[in-house]
Image (cartoon, rainbow, N blue to C red):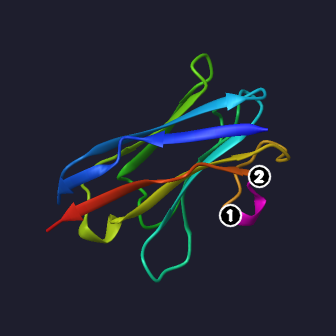
Amino acid sequence: QVQLVESGGGLVQAGGSLRLSCAASGRTFTRYVMGWFRQAPGKEREFVSGMSWSRTSQYYGDSVKGRATISRDNAKNTVYLQMNSLKPEDTAVYYCAADEHSGGFPSRSADDYDYWGQGTQVTVSS
């Protein structure tokens, strides 16, 4: 079992930046593919970014490409999502997720992730 706890959300003006953190505890973190998803009211959960355990594979959703950077510190069991040039349409609950069965390539499908955090709210004002 893995427990994931997100932090770093909040209210920010358009054009601003936020860094989200996801702290993992429990089983071995270093072998998990980690992902970030988001869900806005009335919308489906959307893939934001994913990173392999070795950091060699990083994927981004089209809506955040060029504005987001995922990173992980395996020594701290933490994955980060840096979001820049935030837009009102980035407003959503952001979730961290862990995939323990992947061969190393981050999936864009929420169904492939085994563990989820409780989410952190990001609100971007115009």
Q: Which residue is mark 2?
A: 114
Give amino acid for label 2.
Asp
Q: Position of residue 90 (x, y in %)?
A: 34, 65
Which label is found at residue 110? 1
Mark 2: few/some/many CA within 10 Å (<14, 14-19, 20+): some
In the image, the segment drawn in magenta is 110-114
Mark 1 or 2: in front is 2
Q: Position of residue 56 (x, y in %)?
A: 65, 35
- State the residue in front, 109 or 27: 27
Residue drawn at point x = 67 percent, y = 38 percent = 3
Residue drawn at point x = 43 percent, y = 61 percent = 93
Mark 1: few/some/many CA within 10 Å (<14, 14-19, 20+): some
Main secondary structure type of the part rendered in magenta: helix
* Secondary element at tag 1: helix
Q: Is residue 21 above or below residue 26?
A: below
Q: Is residue 84 above or below residue 93?
A: above
- Residue 28 included in the magenta stretch of the image: no
